[in-house]
Amino acid sequence: MKKINLSILLLSLLIIPSLMIYVMHYYIFRDSMYLLKEFLSQLAFLPIYYIFSTIIIDNIMVSRDKTKLKKSINMTIGVFFSEFGNDFIKICSKYDTKFNDYSTNFRINAQWENYQYSKAYKFINNFQFCIDMYKDDVSILSEFLLNRRSCLIGLLENNNLVEHDTFTDLLLAIFHMCEEFKYRDAANLSTKDYEHLAVDTERAYVLISKEWLNYSKHLKSEYPHLYALSESFNPFCSIDEI
């Protein structure tokens, strides 16, 4: 009710002065035809004004906001890979028995074109990764995740990331792994635990591989100097180099 009353008051404050000016104009110049023509011409301009002010300007503002939001999201993703993601890929790759068979597909360089990124992305979708948690010490992964749990929670609380579905899915997959290790002793896992963790690790590993490709493509087009650094410290190096 208060909101409605406020709207009525605002309309009154806008309409009354306008009517008063029209009345003053009539009593001074006594030209009703001129007032009518002016009123109609201004009324005819309203649709044009609406198109310009509401549609065009609003679209420009929305586009600028989306650009700023995208830049902010990519900055956050960059911090994620710098502080967490690259090391997570290296650790997960130690459990993949097929890592050496496909790692060369992700050896990005300055000559990579968009079609090569698309090809690598399709490769991830079609390739059957093989995660074997017995292949390396699981406590390494457990310690890594639990030590960075607060960092993941902070990222999940970032409202801007809601706009980035794939990255949010990745964070949720990794956080799920954190929760698994939180309630399990990595030194005393059952066979069922190893199998379950293998599924969780593969899910997160596939998602982060895709996200890494997307982010690398973004760096190549927007920040070549950072792309060169990403190329030099590519997490998809051979296991012997990790």
Image (tube, rainbow, N blue to C red):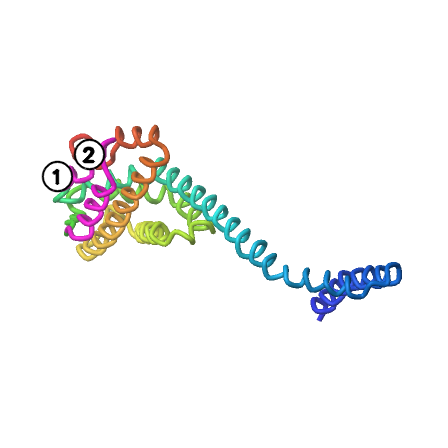
Mark 1: few/some/many CA within 10 Å (<14, 14-19, 20+): some
Label 2 and label 1: CA atoms lie apart by 9 Å
The residues colored magenta run 100-127
Q: Which residue is mark 1?
A: 100
Q: Is residue 150 left or right of residue 15?
A: left
Where residue 69 appears, as percent x and y from the top left, is: 46, 46
Q: Report the label total.
A: 2
Where residue 203 appears, as percent x and y from the top left, is: 25, 53
Q: Is residue 53 left or right of residue 141?
A: right
User: Is the stretch drawn in magenta largely helix, strand or loop?
Assistant: helix
Residue 179 seen in the figure: no
Q: Amino acid at mark 2?
A: Cys
Q: Is residue 8 left or right of residue 182?
A: right
Q: Which residue is mark 2?
A: 237
Please say if the residues under marks 2 and 1 sit with CB atoms less than 8 Å apart.
Answer: no
197 w.r.t. 78: above or below:
below
